[in-house]
Image: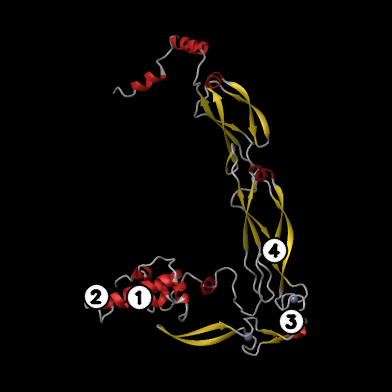
Amino acid sequence: MATKRDYYDVLGVSRNATQDQIKSSYRKLAKKYHPDINKEKGANEKFKEVQEAYDILSDPQKKQMYDQFGHAAFDQTAGSGPFGGGAGGFQDVDLGDIFSSFFGGGRTRRQPTGPVTGNDVIARVRIDFMDAIKGKRIKFRHIYDQMCTHCHGTGAESPSDIETCSTCNGTGVVSATQQTLFGTMQTQKTCPTCGGSGKTIRNRCSKCNGAGYNRVKVDLDVKIPAGINTGQQIRIVEKGERGYNGGPNGDLYLEIIVKPHKSFVRNGNDITLTIPLDFVDAALGTTIEVPTVYGNVEVKIPAGTQPSTKLRLKGKGVNGLRGGTGDQYLEFDIKTPENLLKEQRELLEQYKKIEPKEKSIFQRFKDRFKR
Ligand SMILES: [Zn+2]
Ligand SMILES: [Zn+2]
């Protein structure tokens, strides 16, 4: 069996093409391969292929199924598409999962009239490097839809004002039969009268005018724990988007972005600091005061320190959120003087004249190329 071509390839559009782009591309190709116009061999097949691709991609529901499952979504021979009978085509996937992903995943309307939790909301918060290490409280104003405290989200002035919807008899959905390319399809639509709640309201709540929620401003005071790093999130319960049918709000997540420091570089819980070091100090060794995120510490730099040398200051890294403490690593930017004073030059020339115990570094390097 020939492999079926990707519908987007058939129409020559990208996966994120708009409906207008899909339509215009379809028109061009349909004209090009139309059997009345194009008598070339294979044109008819091309025309059918274009037609089929357009039927799927121009229908938002089918397009979504195709994006998710590819040709398998419409493959009659495989036994079933997601809307076919049984779960035969999807041995590995629980049907519940398939349907939930149609509605954007996660929180679903399994029972249209039941309470539905609102969507989560993400807000990005930029904090300074040192605040991430030591922790910080942040205060900010948050605007969100809070469930109405008077009607508890029902939108009714009193519980006796809530009636069962007569259009859908309280089910929240109405059925419709649709003729499609692949046969008769039974679809369910949200009830237009009650909007899916299954209920209608006689007297609306006076506090929220029947909406079930009120837009409120709250001042939040949030503790950012010490050790947090970029990408980690803080969850604030039920401050996200409002729920439906009396369901709770989603959560608000603060995603932390830590601004880089001008000298300290963080890698997990470890910190690296590069410090400039005079070449004489590197050769002879010295003791210096080195900054850490906890203040200065005295560090003994050993004689013969190289540009590749790394020194570890144990426990001077970050106290991680999930336990464990990192280290600080010192790296060296060894400086060679650019303008020598006369006396310095003389001393270095004298240093060079001293007969070395072994061959010079450069001579040893050159010897490696002899063989
Ligand atoms: Zn209310
Ligand atoms: Zn209804």
Mark 3 belongs to which amino acid? Arg
Query: Disc 3 marks which residue?
Result: 204
Mark 3 or mark 2: whose residue is earlier in sequence: 2
Indicate the quadrant of ligand 1 in the picture. Answer: bottom right
Q: Mark 3 against mark 2, which lies toward the viewer?
A: 3
Q: CA distance from mark 2 to mark 1?
A: 18 Å
Q: Is residue 6 left or right of residue 249?
A: left
Please give the residue where the numbered disc 4 appears in the rendered image: 143
Outermost residue to the bottom:
166
Between marks 4 and 3, how big is the CA–CA gap? 24 Å
- Alpha carbon separation for disc pair 1 and 3: 50 Å
Decide if ligand 1 comes within 8 Å of the CB at mark 3: yes
Question: What whole-number distance in Å separates the C-alpha atoms at marks 1 and 4?
Answer: 46 Å
Q: Residues within 10 Å of mark 2 (few under 14, many from 20)?
A: few
Q: Residues within 10 Å of mark 1 (few under 14, many from 20)?
A: some
Q: Residue at x 68, y 33 (%)?
A: 295
Q: Which label's residue is closer to the chain start, 1 or 4?
A: 1
Residue type, label 1 = Arg
Give the residue pinned by disc 2.
Answer: 42
- The answer to whether residue 46 is seen in the rendering is no
User: In what element is the residue under mark 3?
Assistant: loop
Whether pointer 1 and pointer 3 mark residues with C-beta atoms closer than 8 Å, the reply is no
Q: Position of residue 278 (x, y in %)?
A: 55, 22
What residue is shown with label 1?
27
Q: Is residue 11 left or right of residue 179?
A: left
The amino acid marked with disc number 4 is: Ile
Up the image or down, 364 lies above or below 49; here it is above
Circles 2 and 4 in contact, beta carbons < 8 Å: no
